[in-house]
Every structure is written in C-alpha cells, then in structure tokens.
C-alpha cells in the first residue's frame, strides 16, 4: 500500500509540475478519502407490507413477507425456519439457524450472531402460520420439493415480481428495518428491538434500523399538540 502511494505521489508530482493540477493530494497530511455515500433504504408502512404480501403468488409467500416484516427475521433465518421452531400454543418462534447459497450450494448453519433467540408472535401472524400454511415438509417455507429454498431464485421468481405488481420498491432485508420501526412506534425501547432482531450491539440497532417512517414527523407533531393543549 505504501509503495503504491509512493508511485501515485510521483505521478501526481509530474502533474503539478505541468500545471495540470494545483496540489498533489498525496502530499496533504490531513487529506482524507471521501466517505462512501450512505444509501437511504426504504422503510415500508403497514399498508405497503400488506400490498406486497397480497401481490405474492402463493399463500406461503404472503406469510413469509409478514414474518419478515412483523418478526424481523433475516431472510436466511426465515428460509431455515422449521416447524419444530414454531410453538403456536405459546405464540412463539425460535430462531436457531440460517441458510445461505452464496457459494452455489445451500449451506445451513448458525445465525449471523451464533445466538438463538425466541420471539413472541402477534396474534394475526399466529393465525397465518396456523391456518395459511401446509405442513408437507419439516420446513415452514420449503421449496416445491420440500427442501430449502434458494434465496436468489425466490427473489427472482416471487419477490421482484410482487414488488413490480404492488409498486413497492424494497429489498427483503428492508423488512427488518420496517419491523424495527413498527416496534419503536409500538413503544419498544432500543434494547427491546436489539433483542427482537438479534443484534449483538445495540448501536447496530440505533445506527441501521432506527429510521424515521414517512409521515412520522406529522404523527409526532400531532402528539405534541395534544400535550400542549393538555398543559393549557
């Protein structure tokens, strides 16, 4: 790296000598590389989540969208979910594994943080899991043969088409941020959200997922108005 910088400095010294540039940036001790631009990913409203789910071609895909948005699972965790991980009587879902196929081969392993977490499900999702899905496989969201789905295939054949049909522009991972914001709107603390989503560090929760939902500013102003009126 130092040798590369030295070569670049000598090249740019020639450019300064030829008046092509005013200053050699390699000579500036305080110079910093430009920061990578931060992409502002979307956060879906509850209505957009419902529209996206309705646009899915199959009942299992519709439930999968709701699990991603209302439970906040990573897509690999959702695709690795087994029926033995779901307790509808207790209304809980336990995340133990994750699946990935980035190498061209389906690999089932631990979660990103190597931790197991149990999440309490909302009643509506308990009903969807209990009545809306067949139990023809040990997996909650299997492929046609009962095995693990490949994310890229599901994204291409189902997710992308549903986004186009519903007009919702988002990636599956955006539903984790959506879940975080829904939890915050419901009164959850950052620590609650951290445990719900399975982050190792609460700063990850605050930095990446505590975004502001469009229209949230209006909601807050309305609440402030109510407090001001109450105070007289």
Image: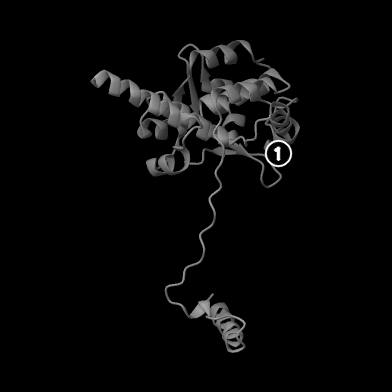
From this viewpoint, is residue 75 visible?
A: yes
- Looking at the image, residue 87 sits to the left or right of residue 103; the answer is left
Q: Nearer the viewer, residue 19 or 176?
A: 19
Q: Quadrant of residue 53?
A: top right
- Looking at the image, residue 173 sits to the left or right of residue 116; the answer is right
Q: Residues within 10 Å of mark 1 (few under 14, many from 20)?
A: few
Q: Nearer the viewer, residue 182 or 115?
A: 182
205 to 14, vertically: above or below: above
The image's colour scheme reads one colour
What residue is shown with label 1? 152
Q: Quadrant of residue 41?
A: top right
From this viewpoint, is residue 138 visible?
A: no
Q: Residue at x 67, y 31 (%)?
A: 148
Q: Pick the quarter of the image with the N terminus.
A: bottom right
Q: Quadrant of residue 84?
A: top right
Q: Residue at x 58, y 30 (%)?
A: 78
Q: Position of residue 21 (x, y in %)?
A: 58, 80
131 to 143, vertically: above or below: above
Q: Nearer the viewer, residue 83 or 195?
A: 195
**Residue placed furthest toward the front:** 232
Q: Position of residue 19 (x, y in %)?
A: 60, 85
Q: Residue at x 70, y 39 (%)?
A: 152
How many numbered markers are drawn?
1
Q: Pick the quarter of the image with the C terminus.
A: top left
Q: Residue at x 53, y 23 (%)?
A: 85
Q: Secondary structure at mark 1?
A: helix
**Residue placed furthest toward the left:** 232
Q: Position of residue 39 (x, y in %)?
A: 56, 47
């Amino acid at each position: 790296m130092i040798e590369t910088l030295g070569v670049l400095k000598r090249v740019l010294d020639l450019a300064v000598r030829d008046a092509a540039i005013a200053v050699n940036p390699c000579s500036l001790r305080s110079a910093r590389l430009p920061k990578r631009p931060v992409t502002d990913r979307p956060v879906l409203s509850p209505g957009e989540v419902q529209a996206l789910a309705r646009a899915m071609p199959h009942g299992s895909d519709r439930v999968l969208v709701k699990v991603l948005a209302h439970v906040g699972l990573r897509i690999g965790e959702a695709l690795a979910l087994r029926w033995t991980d779901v307790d509808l009587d207790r209304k809980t879902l336990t995340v133990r594994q994750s699946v990935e196929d980035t190498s061209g081969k389906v690999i089932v392993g631990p979660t990103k943080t190597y931790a197991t977490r149990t999440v309490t499900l909302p009643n509506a999702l308990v009903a969807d899991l209990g009545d809306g899905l067949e139990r023809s496989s040990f997996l909650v969201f299997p492929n046609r043969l009962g095995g693990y789905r490949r994310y890229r295939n599901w994204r291409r054949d189902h997710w992308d088409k549903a986004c186009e049909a519903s007009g919702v522009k988002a990636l599956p991972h955006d539903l984790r941020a959506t879940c975080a914001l829904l939890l915050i709107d419901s009164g959850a603390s950052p620590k609650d959200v951290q445990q719900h989503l399975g982050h190792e560090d609460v700063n990850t929760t605050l930095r990446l997922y505590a975004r502001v939902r469009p229209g949230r500013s209006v909601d807050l102003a309305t609440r402030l108005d109510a407090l001001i009126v109450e105070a007289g």
